[in-house]
Image: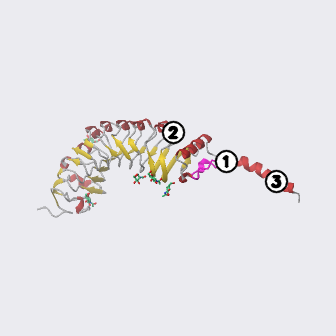
Protein backbone atom coordinates (compact mmCIF):
# COMPACT_ATOMS: atom_id res chain seq x y z
CA UNK A 1 0.00 0.00 0.00
CA UNK A 2 1.27 3.44 -0.93
CA UNK A 3 2.01 5.53 2.16
CA UNK A 4 0.67 8.65 0.38
CA UNK A 5 -2.77 7.13 0.38
CA UNK A 6 -2.69 7.38 4.13
CA UNK A 7 -0.95 10.75 4.45
CA UNK A 8 -3.35 12.66 2.23
CA UNK A 9 -6.47 11.99 4.33
CA UNK A 10 -4.40 12.54 7.49
CA UNK A 11 -3.20 15.97 6.32
CA UNK A 12 -6.76 16.91 5.37
CA UNK A 13 -7.85 15.86 8.84
CA UNK A 14 -5.11 17.98 10.45
CA UNK A 15 -5.92 20.93 8.21
CA UNK A 16 -9.50 20.90 9.41
CA UNK A 17 -9.02 20.03 13.03
CA UNK A 18 -6.41 22.71 13.82
CA UNK A 19 -8.24 25.81 12.69
CA UNK A 20 -11.35 24.32 14.25
CA UNK A 21 -9.77 23.96 17.69
CA UNK A 22 -8.38 27.51 17.74
CA UNK A 23 -11.66 28.86 16.38
CA UNK A 24 -13.50 27.18 19.24
CA UNK A 25 -11.35 28.85 21.89
CA UNK A 26 -13.67 31.29 23.64
CA UNK A 27 -11.05 32.82 25.90
CA UNK A 28 -10.15 36.46 25.28
CA UNK A 29 -6.38 36.52 24.50
CA UNK A 30 -5.78 39.55 26.72
CA UNK A 31 -7.54 37.88 29.67
CA UNK A 32 -5.51 34.72 29.10
CA UNK A 33 -2.29 36.71 29.21
CA UNK A 34 -3.35 38.33 32.50
CA UNK A 35 -4.37 35.00 34.07
CA UNK A 36 -0.99 33.50 33.18
CA UNK A 37 0.64 36.53 34.79
CA UNK A 38 -1.48 35.99 37.94
CA UNK A 39 -0.40 32.35 38.02
CA UNK A 40 3.23 33.41 37.74
CA UNK A 41 2.78 36.07 40.45
CA UNK A 42 1.38 33.37 42.73
CA UNK A 43 4.49 31.22 42.11
CA UNK A 44 2.78 28.68 39.83
CA UNK A 45 0.77 26.94 42.55
CA UNK A 46 -0.43 23.39 42.12
CA UNK A 47 -3.97 24.72 42.66
CA UNK A 48 -3.78 26.42 39.23
CA UNK A 49 -2.26 23.44 37.38
CA UNK A 50 -5.19 23.43 34.93
CA UNK A 51 -4.17 26.90 33.74
CA UNK A 52 -2.38 25.53 30.65
CA UNK A 53 -1.60 28.16 27.97
CA UNK A 54 -2.53 25.62 25.26
CA UNK A 55 -6.12 25.29 26.44
CA UNK A 56 -9.15 27.56 26.50
CA UNK A 57 -9.00 29.73 29.64
CA UNK A 58 -12.82 29.63 29.85
CA UNK A 59 -12.36 25.96 30.80
CA UNK A 60 -9.78 26.62 33.52
CA UNK A 61 -10.30 25.88 37.20
CA UNK A 62 -11.61 28.69 39.49
CA UNK A 63 -12.48 31.11 36.66
CA UNK A 64 -15.70 31.82 34.75
CA UNK A 65 -16.22 33.52 31.42
CA UNK A 66 -19.25 35.67 30.76
CA UNK A 67 -21.73 33.72 28.62
CA UNK A 68 -22.15 36.55 26.10
CA UNK A 69 -18.80 38.31 25.97
CA UNK A 70 -16.49 35.42 26.95
CA UNK A 71 -14.55 37.85 29.11
CA UNK A 72 -13.36 36.58 32.52
CA UNK A 73 -16.14 37.52 34.95
CA UNK A 74 -15.12 35.53 38.00
CA UNK A 75 -11.91 34.47 39.72
CA UNK A 76 -12.65 32.47 42.85
CA UNK A 77 -9.69 30.87 44.58
CA UNK A 78 -10.67 29.02 47.75
CA UNK A 79 -9.15 26.45 50.07
CA UNK A 80 -5.88 26.65 48.24
CA UNK A 81 -2.33 26.07 49.34
CA UNK A 82 -0.76 29.24 48.00
CA UNK A 83 1.98 31.37 49.52
CA UNK A 84 2.27 34.96 48.42
CA UNK A 85 0.30 38.16 48.01
CA UNK A 86 -2.78 39.05 46.00
CA UNK A 87 -1.23 39.88 42.62
CA UNK A 88 -1.63 43.48 41.43
CA UNK A 89 -2.34 41.91 38.02
CA UNK A 90 -5.92 41.02 39.11
CA UNK A 91 -6.69 44.67 38.30
CA UNK A 92 -6.10 43.85 34.63
CA UNK A 93 -9.18 41.64 34.25
CA UNK A 94 -11.50 44.55 33.36
CA UNK A 95 -14.74 42.53 33.25
CA UNK A 96 -14.33 40.86 36.63
CA UNK A 97 -17.57 40.88 38.63
CA UNK A 98 -16.53 38.42 41.32
CA UNK A 99 -13.09 38.24 42.95
CA UNK A 100 -12.53 35.76 45.71
CA UNK A 101 -9.53 34.58 47.69
CA UNK A 102 -11.03 32.59 50.54
CA UNK A 103 -9.22 30.33 52.97
CA UNK A 104 -5.89 30.53 51.18
CA UNK A 105 -3.11 29.35 53.46
CA UNK A 106 -0.29 31.89 53.66
CA UNK A 107 -1.95 34.55 51.54
CA UNK A 108 -0.34 37.57 53.16
CA UNK A 109 0.25 41.27 52.53
CA UNK A 110 -2.29 43.92 51.70
CA UNK A 111 -5.02 44.48 49.13
CA UNK A 112 -3.57 45.85 45.86
CA UNK A 113 -4.92 49.26 44.82
CA UNK A 114 -5.19 48.00 41.23
CA UNK A 115 -8.56 46.44 42.11
CA UNK A 116 -10.04 49.95 41.90
CA UNK A 117 -9.65 49.54 38.12
CA UNK A 118 -12.36 46.85 38.16
CA UNK A 119 -15.40 48.80 36.99
CA UNK A 120 -17.84 45.87 37.18
CA UNK A 121 -16.76 44.29 40.47
CA UNK A 122 -19.80 43.35 42.56
CA UNK A 123 -18.47 40.71 44.95
CA UNK A 124 -15.12 41.03 46.70
CA UNK A 125 -14.41 38.18 49.11
CA UNK A 126 -10.99 38.17 50.74
CA UNK A 127 -11.91 36.24 53.87
CA UNK A 128 -10.04 33.72 55.98
CA UNK A 129 -6.54 34.53 54.80
CA UNK A 130 -3.62 36.19 56.51
CA UNK A 131 -3.98 39.65 55.02
CA UNK A 132 -2.73 42.51 57.15
CA UNK A 133 -2.15 46.25 57.28
CA UNK A 134 -4.88 48.89 57.34
CA UNK A 135 -8.24 48.39 55.63
CA UNK A 136 -7.65 50.45 52.49
CA UNK A 137 -9.96 53.44 52.05
CA UNK A 138 -9.64 53.06 48.28
CA UNK A 139 -12.17 50.22 48.51
CA UNK A 140 -14.82 52.97 48.54
CA UNK A 141 -13.88 53.77 44.92
CA UNK A 142 -15.32 50.46 43.68
CA UNK A 143 -18.83 51.88 43.34
CA UNK A 144 -20.29 48.68 41.91
CA UNK A 145 -19.60 46.62 45.06
CA UNK A 146 -22.63 44.98 46.64
CA UNK A 147 -20.69 42.51 48.79
CA UNK A 148 -17.40 43.20 50.58
CA UNK A 149 -15.97 40.57 52.90
CA UNK A 150 -12.50 40.90 54.42
CA UNK A 151 -13.33 38.94 57.59
CA UNK A 152 -10.98 36.49 59.34
CA UNK A 153 -7.73 38.24 58.53
CA UNK A 154 -5.22 40.29 60.48
CA UNK A 155 -6.18 43.81 59.39
CA UNK A 156 -5.28 46.53 61.87
CA UNK A 157 -6.00 50.23 62.32
CA UNK A 158 -9.35 51.95 62.20
CA UNK A 159 -12.33 51.53 59.91
CA UNK A 160 -12.16 53.87 56.89
CA UNK A 161 -15.20 56.20 57.10
CA UNK A 162 -15.43 56.29 53.30
CA UNK A 163 -16.82 52.73 53.14
CA UNK A 164 -20.28 54.23 53.75
CA UNK A 165 -19.95 55.88 50.32
CA UNK A 166 -20.33 52.55 48.54
CA UNK A 167 -23.73 53.26 46.96
CA UNK A 168 -24.73 49.64 46.34
CA UNK A 169 -23.29 47.83 49.32
CA UNK A 170 -25.58 45.23 50.88
CA UNK A 171 -23.16 43.16 52.98
CA UNK A 172 -20.11 44.63 54.69
CA UNK A 173 -18.01 42.10 56.62
CA UNK A 174 -15.09 43.58 58.53
CA UNK A 175 -15.39 41.08 61.38
CA UNK A 176 -12.65 38.90 62.88
CA UNK A 177 -9.73 41.25 62.42
CA UNK A 178 -7.77 43.43 64.84
CA UNK A 179 -9.48 46.72 64.07
CA UNK A 180 -9.27 49.50 66.64
CA UNK A 181 -10.79 52.93 67.14
CA UNK A 182 -14.46 53.83 66.99
CA UNK A 183 -17.23 53.05 64.53
CA UNK A 184 -17.14 55.95 62.04
CA UNK A 185 -19.85 58.63 62.33
CA UNK A 186 -20.34 58.21 58.56
CA UNK A 187 -21.75 54.71 59.15
CA UNK A 188 -25.01 56.49 59.92
CA UNK A 189 -24.93 57.95 56.39
CA UNK A 190 -24.81 54.89 54.16
CA UNK A 191 -26.26 55.68 50.74
CA UNK A 192 -27.26 52.04 50.34
CA UNK A 193 -30.60 50.86 51.75
CA UNK A 194 -30.76 48.33 54.63
CA UNK A 195 -27.12 47.26 54.72
CA UNK A 196 -25.93 44.30 56.79
CA UNK A 197 -23.00 45.38 58.92
CA UNK A 198 -20.61 42.87 60.53
CA UNK A 199 -17.94 44.33 62.83
CA UNK A 200 -17.64 41.55 65.42
CA UNK A 201 -14.45 40.14 66.96
CA UNK A 202 -12.35 43.28 66.70
CA UNK A 203 -11.07 45.73 69.30
CA UNK A 204 -13.41 48.62 68.61
CA UNK A 205 -13.87 51.10 71.43
CA UNK A 206 -15.98 54.08 72.42
CA UNK A 207 -19.68 54.75 71.92
CA UNK A 208 -21.65 53.83 68.84
CA UNK A 209 -22.27 57.13 66.99
CA UNK A 210 -25.86 58.40 67.35
CA UNK A 211 -25.95 58.86 63.57
CA UNK A 212 -26.43 55.09 63.18
CA UNK A 213 -29.90 55.56 64.61
CA UNK A 214 -30.87 57.38 61.38
CA UNK A 215 -30.09 54.28 59.31
CA UNK A 216 -32.16 51.23 58.68
CA UNK A 217 -29.89 48.20 58.99
CA UNK A 218 -30.88 44.60 58.31
CA UNK A 219 -28.06 43.20 60.44
CA UNK A 220 -25.91 44.79 63.11
CA UNK A 221 -23.23 42.49 64.47
CA UNK A 222 -20.98 44.33 66.92
CA UNK A 223 -20.24 41.35 69.18
CA UNK A 224 -16.91 40.87 70.95
CA UNK A 225 -15.58 44.40 70.90
CA UNK A 226 -15.06 46.91 73.69
CA UNK A 227 -17.92 49.23 72.80
CA UNK A 228 -19.62 51.21 75.55
CA UNK A 229 -22.73 53.19 76.31
CA UNK A 230 -26.36 53.33 75.27
CA UNK A 231 -27.41 51.75 71.96
CA UNK A 232 -31.19 51.84 72.48
CA UNK A 233 -31.41 54.36 69.59
CA UNK A 234 -30.46 51.56 67.17
CA UNK A 235 -33.88 50.02 67.72
CA UNK A 236 -37.29 51.43 66.78
CA UNK A 237 -40.72 50.16 65.83
CA UNK A 238 -40.33 51.15 62.20
CA UNK A 239 -36.92 49.63 61.57
CA UNK A 240 -36.34 46.42 59.64
CA UNK A 241 -33.56 45.10 61.86
CA UNK A 242 -33.58 41.30 61.74
CA UNK A 243 -30.33 40.39 63.45
CA UNK A 244 -28.87 42.31 66.38
CA UNK A 245 -25.77 40.81 67.96
CA UNK A 246 -24.29 43.15 70.56
CA UNK A 247 -22.93 40.42 72.82
CA UNK A 248 -19.71 40.71 74.78
CA UNK A 249 -19.30 44.46 74.90
CA UNK A 250 -19.78 47.01 77.67
CA UNK A 251 -23.17 48.35 76.60
CA UNK A 252 -25.24 49.87 79.36
CA UNK A 253 -28.87 50.89 78.85
CA UNK A 254 -32.43 50.29 80.01
CA UNK A 255 -33.92 47.49 77.91
CA UNK A 256 -37.44 48.43 79.12
CA UNK A 257 -37.27 51.61 76.99
CA UNK A 258 -36.31 49.82 73.77
CA UNK A 259 -38.93 49.80 71.00
CA UNK A 260 -38.31 46.47 69.36
CA UNK A 261 -38.79 46.25 65.59
CA UNK A 262 -41.34 43.62 64.52
CA UNK A 263 -38.76 42.26 62.09
CA UNK A 264 -36.34 41.22 64.86
CA UNK A 265 -35.48 37.51 64.65
CA UNK A 266 -32.08 37.21 66.31
CA UNK A 267 -31.31 39.12 69.49
CA UNK A 268 -28.05 38.45 71.30
CA UNK A 269 -26.90 40.89 73.97
CA UNK A 270 -25.18 38.48 76.38
CA UNK A 271 -22.31 39.79 78.52
CA UNK A 272 -23.09 43.50 78.77
CA UNK A 273 -24.38 45.77 81.53
CA UNK A 274 -27.97 46.06 80.32
CA UNK A 275 -30.60 46.77 82.99
CA UNK A 276 -34.38 47.14 83.26
CA UNK A 277 -37.03 44.60 82.17
CA UNK A 278 -37.57 42.57 79.04
CA UNK A 279 -40.18 44.56 77.00
CA UNK A 280 -43.61 42.89 76.72
CA UNK A 281 -43.53 43.63 72.96
CA UNK A 282 -40.88 40.90 72.66
CA UNK A 283 -43.73 38.38 72.94
CA UNK A 284 -44.99 39.64 69.55
CA UNK A 285 -41.79 38.76 67.69
CA UNK A 286 -40.97 35.68 65.62
CA UNK A 287 -37.69 35.21 67.44
CA UNK A 288 -35.39 32.45 66.24
CA UNK A 289 -32.58 33.23 68.65
CA UNK A 290 -32.34 35.12 71.90
CA UNK A 291 -29.65 35.40 74.55
CA UNK A 292 -29.77 38.10 77.22
CA UNK A 293 -27.62 36.27 79.78
CA UNK A 294 -24.90 37.95 81.87
CA UNK A 295 -26.54 41.36 82.20
CA UNK A 296 -28.33 43.26 84.98
CA UNK A 297 -31.92 42.62 83.96
CA UNK A 298 -34.77 42.30 86.43
CA UNK A 299 -38.42 41.36 86.68
CA UNK A 300 -40.58 38.66 85.18
CA UNK A 301 -39.87 37.31 81.71
CA UNK A 302 -43.03 38.31 79.78
CA UNK A 303 -45.21 35.29 79.02
CA UNK A 304 -46.07 34.61 75.38
CA UNK A 305 -44.69 34.37 71.88
CA UNK A 306 -41.45 32.46 71.74
CA UNK A 307 -40.01 33.76 75.00
CA UNK A 308 -40.67 30.53 76.94
CA UNK A 309 -39.14 28.38 74.18
CA UNK A 310 -35.59 29.46 74.99
CA UNK A 311 -33.27 27.81 77.50
CA UNK A 312 -32.66 29.02 81.02
CA UNK A 313 -29.04 29.73 80.00
CA UNK A 314 -30.35 32.31 77.51
CA UNK A 315 -31.58 34.27 80.53
CA UNK A 316 -29.30 33.30 83.43
CA UNK A 317 -26.76 35.49 85.25
CA UNK A 318 -28.94 38.58 85.49
CA UNK A 319 -29.72 40.64 88.56
CA UNK A 320 -33.25 39.48 89.31
CA UNK A 321 -34.82 38.09 86.15
CA UNK A 322 -37.45 35.42 86.95
CA UNK A 323 -40.24 33.29 85.52
CA UNK A 324 -40.22 30.51 82.90
CA UNK A 325 -37.74 29.23 81.83
CA UNK A 326 -36.03 30.60 84.95
CA UNK A 327 -37.35 29.80 88.45
CA UNK A 328 -40.67 31.42 89.39
CA UNK A 329 -40.69 35.02 90.63
CA UNK A 330 -40.99 35.43 94.39
C1 LIG B 1 1.47 23.19 50.44
O1 LIG B 1 2.51 23.60 49.60
C2 LIG B 1 3.79 23.38 50.17
C3 LIG B 1 4.83 24.01 49.26
O2 LIG B 1 4.53 23.77 47.92
C4 LIG B 1 3.99 21.89 50.39
O3 LIG B 1 5.24 21.68 50.99
C5 LIG B 1 2.89 21.37 51.32
O4 LIG B 1 2.98 19.98 51.46
C6 LIG B 1 1.52 21.72 50.79
N1 LIG B 1 0.52 21.42 51.80
C7 LIG B 1 -0.64 20.82 51.51
C8 LIG B 1 -1.56 20.62 52.67
O5 LIG B 1 -0.95 20.49 50.39
C1 LIG C 1 -2.41 32.45 59.22
O1 LIG C 1 -1.17 32.43 59.90
C2 LIG C 1 -1.21 31.74 61.12
C3 LIG C 1 0.12 31.92 61.81
O2 LIG C 1 1.16 31.96 60.91
C4 LIG C 1 -1.57 30.29 60.85
O3 LIG C 1 -1.65 29.56 62.06
C5 LIG C 1 -2.91 30.22 60.15
O4 LIG C 1 -3.21 28.90 59.79
C6 LIG C 1 -2.92 31.06 58.90
N1 LIG C 1 -4.26 31.11 58.39
C7 LIG C 1 -4.54 30.91 57.11
C8 LIG C 1 -5.97 30.90 56.75
O5 LIG C 1 -3.68 30.76 56.28
C1 LIG D 1 3.43 29.06 55.13
O1 LIG D 1 4.46 29.91 55.56
C2 LIG D 1 5.23 29.37 56.60
C3 LIG D 1 6.18 30.41 57.08
O2 LIG D 1 6.75 31.11 56.02
C4 LIG D 1 5.92 28.10 56.08
O3 LIG D 1 6.64 27.51 57.13
C5 LIG D 1 4.86 27.12 55.59
O4 LIG D 1 5.47 25.99 55.01
C6 LIG D 1 3.99 27.78 54.57
N1 LIG D 1 2.90 26.87 54.23
C7 LIG D 1 2.57 26.62 52.99
C8 LIG D 1 1.41 25.72 52.83
O5 LIG D 1 3.16 27.08 52.03
C1 LIG E 1 -43.72 54.61 61.96
O1 LIG E 1 -44.42 54.51 60.74
C2 LIG E 1 -45.76 54.94 60.83
C3 LIG E 1 -46.46 54.63 59.52
O2 LIG E 1 -45.62 54.85 58.44
C4 LIG E 1 -45.77 56.43 61.17
O3 LIG E 1 -47.10 56.89 61.28
C5 LIG E 1 -45.04 56.65 62.48
O4 LIG E 1 -44.95 58.02 62.76
C6 LIG E 1 -43.66 56.04 62.46
N1 LIG E 1 -43.10 56.08 63.80
C7 LIG E 1 -41.87 56.52 64.05
C8 LIG E 1 -41.44 56.44 65.46
O5 LIG E 1 -41.12 56.94 63.18
C1 LIG F 1 -26.21 32.21 76.11
O1 LIG F 1 -24.97 32.87 76.26
C2 LIG F 1 -24.24 32.45 77.40
C3 LIG F 1 -23.00 33.31 77.48
O2 LIG F 1 -22.21 33.15 76.35
C4 LIG F 1 -23.92 30.97 77.28
O3 LIG F 1 -23.24 30.54 78.44
C5 LIG F 1 -25.20 30.19 77.10
O4 LIG F 1 -24.90 28.83 76.89
C6 LIG F 1 -25.98 30.73 75.93
N1 LIG F 1 -27.25 29.99 75.84
C7 LIG F 1 -27.49 29.10 74.88
C8 LIG F 1 -28.77 28.34 74.92
O5 LIG F 1 -26.70 28.91 73.96
Between disc 3 and disc 1, the foreground one is 3
Q: Quadrant of residue 138?
A: top left
**Taking 50 as reference, is 292 left or right?**
left
Element marked by disc 1: loop
Measuring from the top left, give residue 298's x and y in whole percent.
Answer: 15, 55
The Cα atoms of the two marked residues, 1 and 2, are separated by 27 Å
Query: Which secondary structure class fits the magenta region best?
Result: loop
| Magenta-highlighted residues | 49-60
Q: Residue at x 22, y 58 (%)?
A: 315
**Taking 259 as reference, is 133 left or right?**
right
Disc 3 or 1, which lies upstream in sequence?
3
Are the two marked residues, 2 and 3, in contact with CB atoms closer than 8 angstroms?
no
Q: Is residue 299 visible?
A: yes
Q: Quadrant of residue 148?
A: top left
Dot label at residue 24: 1
Q: Is mark 2 within 8 Å of ligand 2?
A: no
- Farthest residue in the right direction? 1
Is residue 284 part of the magenta span, yes or no?
no
Between disc 1 and disc 2, the foreground one is 2
Residue placed most toward the observer, 107 or 12: 107
Element marked by disc 2: helix
Residue placed most toward the observer, 247 or 303: 247
- The local crowd at label 2, few if under 14, some if 14 to 19, many if 20 or more residues have their Cα within 10 Å, is some
Disc 2 or 3, which lies upstream in sequence?
3
Amino acid sequence: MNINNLLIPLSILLLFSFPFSSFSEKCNPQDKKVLLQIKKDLNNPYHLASWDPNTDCCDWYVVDCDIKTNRISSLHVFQANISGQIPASVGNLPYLENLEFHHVTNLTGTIPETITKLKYLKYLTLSFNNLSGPVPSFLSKIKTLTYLDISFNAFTGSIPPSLSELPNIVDLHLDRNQLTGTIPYSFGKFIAKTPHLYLSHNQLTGEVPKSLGDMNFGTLDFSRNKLVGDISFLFGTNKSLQTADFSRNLFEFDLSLVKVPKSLENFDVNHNKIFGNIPVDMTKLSLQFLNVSYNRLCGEIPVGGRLQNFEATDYFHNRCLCGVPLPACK
